[in-house]
Image: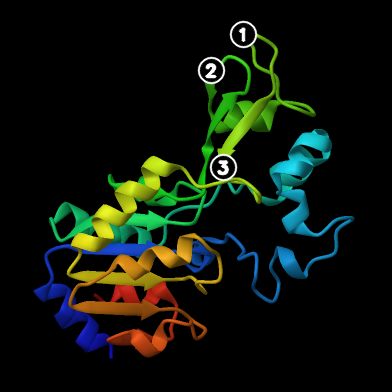
Amino acid sequence: MEQKFKEAVEKSNYIVFFGGAGVSTESGIPDFRSVDGLYNQKYKYPPEVMVSHSFYVSRTEEFFDFYKEKMIFKEAKPNQAHIKLAQLEAMGKLKAVVTQNIDGLHQAAGSKEVLELHGSVHRNYCEDCGKFFDLDYILDSNGVPKCDACGGNVKPDVVLYEEGLDSETLTRTIQHISKADMLIIGGTSLAVYPAAGLIDYFKGDYLVVINMAPTPRDKHADIVINKKIGEVFSRL
């Protein structure tokens, strides 16, 4: 099946990659839903509550304690999947990376057209005046990060539970997927909506699923590979 994938990549000229947490696990970032992921650890509140908009508003300091400890992995480095995708883009084959991850590793690997459905830990903004801050500003702050210009709360530019996805990012994602001749779905269980529903816009030649566990789209895919995505891409 990997050989078939390699041949399909060679034939394709408008590849779009749609990725999830499994893309970054090989960089040491845990998957929320894996056996040892956040959803299976014990906290005072369930993780999905602690990264919700209402929790951020009502228990802001507790939100940041959890966020800084469990959602940020500053030392993580791009793995073979990130690197190969950037190379495919540089070759002109891959046109966009659509990611559900917030770690910025695709950009760190050199990818340019990265559509971050759930935002990024590297962007943070003052809720009052709109000033932007980098990741270090959040990490170096005590308690709730405050804007150095106006004193407002500095919120991570990540999509929390109960919040909607960015409309411009969604539009660009749909445009790319609808034009693609190959869509590679990698490292995602396709359990999170509305993000998972975006792949319905694909009408191209090759639908590829690379994921350790089965997904709801396997039966519709032309190529299914149940292996670690970094290992698969390292052999492309």
Q: Above or below — where is 88 with respect to 230?
A: above
Circle 3 SS class: strand
Q: Mark 2–mark 3 contact, CB under 8 Å?
A: no
Numbered circle sitting on residue 158: 3
What's the residue at 21%, 87% (across, down)? 4
Spatial CA distance of label 2 from label 1 is 8 Å
Sequence order check: which comes first, mark 1 or mark 3? 1
Which residue occupies the foreground of this view, 12 or 179? 179
In the rendering, which numbered label is found on residue 149? 1
Q: Quadrant of residue 82?
A: bottom left
Q: Amino acid at mark 2?
A: Lys
Which residue is rendered at x = 17% and y = 52% of the image? 90
- Point out residue 141 in the picture as x, y percentages from the top left corner: 71, 26
Marking on residue 131: 2
Which quadrant is home to the N terminus? bottom left
Q: Earlier in the sequence, mark 2 or mark 3?
A: 2
